[in-house]
Amino acid sequence: MLNLTYYDDKEQSYCDICEQERDQTLWYYSCSICDTSAHPKCVLGQFPFLKDGITWAYADHSHTHHLKFFRKAEGYPECSRCGKLCQEEIFKYEESTCNYIIHCKCWDY
């Protein structure tokens, strides 16, 4: 269970998710049992109020899709727009005729 925390008595602190240094003057999430700490954005993601599986209609492809939002993609597939591996929030449509996946940051919404 992660707790929102403010005080950090360590000299240098790193986020266990992105592995970047954390600013000790800012709030962060931590677990005292497993000694884990992380930036709020790394825990909550870019879209903290969206639930996995919520759908949007999308018509920028050869046909209209009803894309589903997911925080993480299994197996790190390639984005259909930029071709890079999906390691963050995505919109995904899977049918036998079309396997369309796009990073949230690649989608012009």
Image (cartoon, grey):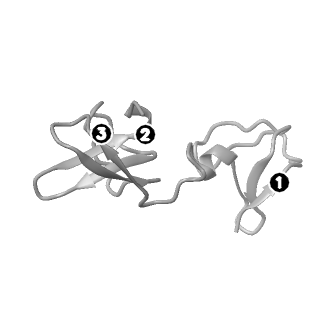
Left or right position of 53 against 31: left
Q: Nearer the viewer, residue 31 or 10?
A: 31
Marks 1 and 3, Cα distance to the nearest angstrom?
35 Å
The residue type indicated by label 3 comes to Cys
Nearer the N terminus, badge 2 or badge 3?
A: 3
The residue that disc 1 covers is 5
Query: Where is mark 2, residue-wise?
Result: 104
Kindly report the distance in space between the C-alpha atoms of the residues bearing marks 2 and 1: 28 Å
- The circle on residue 79 is 3
Image coordinates for residue 2, horizontal then vertical, percent: 71, 63
Q: Which-is-in-front pick, marks 1 and 3?
A: 3
Kind of residue at disc 2:
Cys
Question: Disc 1 or 3, which lies upstream in sequence?
Answer: 1
Label 1 sits on a secondary structure element that is strand
* In this view, the mark in front (2 or 1): 2
Lateral position of residue 50 relative to residue 104, left or right: right
Query: Relative to 26, is 96 on the left or the right?
Result: left
Spatial separation of the CA atoms under disc 2 and disc 3: 10 Å
User: Hey, which quadrant is residue 29 in on the image?
Assistant: bottom right
Q: Is residue 79 left or right of residue 48?
A: left
What number of labels is visible?
3
Quick one: label 3, few (<14), some, or many (20+) residues within 10 Å?
A: many
Q: Quadrant of the N terminus?
A: bottom right
Quadrant where the C terminus is found in the figure: top left
Mark 2 or 1 closer to N-term?
A: 1
Amino acid identity at mark 1: Thr
Q: Cβ–Cβ below 8 Å for labels 2 and 1?
A: no
**x, y percentage for residue 90?**
40, 46
Give 20 or 71, whichever is nearer the viewer.
71
Residue found 47% across the figure and 53% down from its top: 71
Find numbered disc 2 in the image and state the secondary structure of the residue it sits on.
helix
Element marked by disc 3: loop
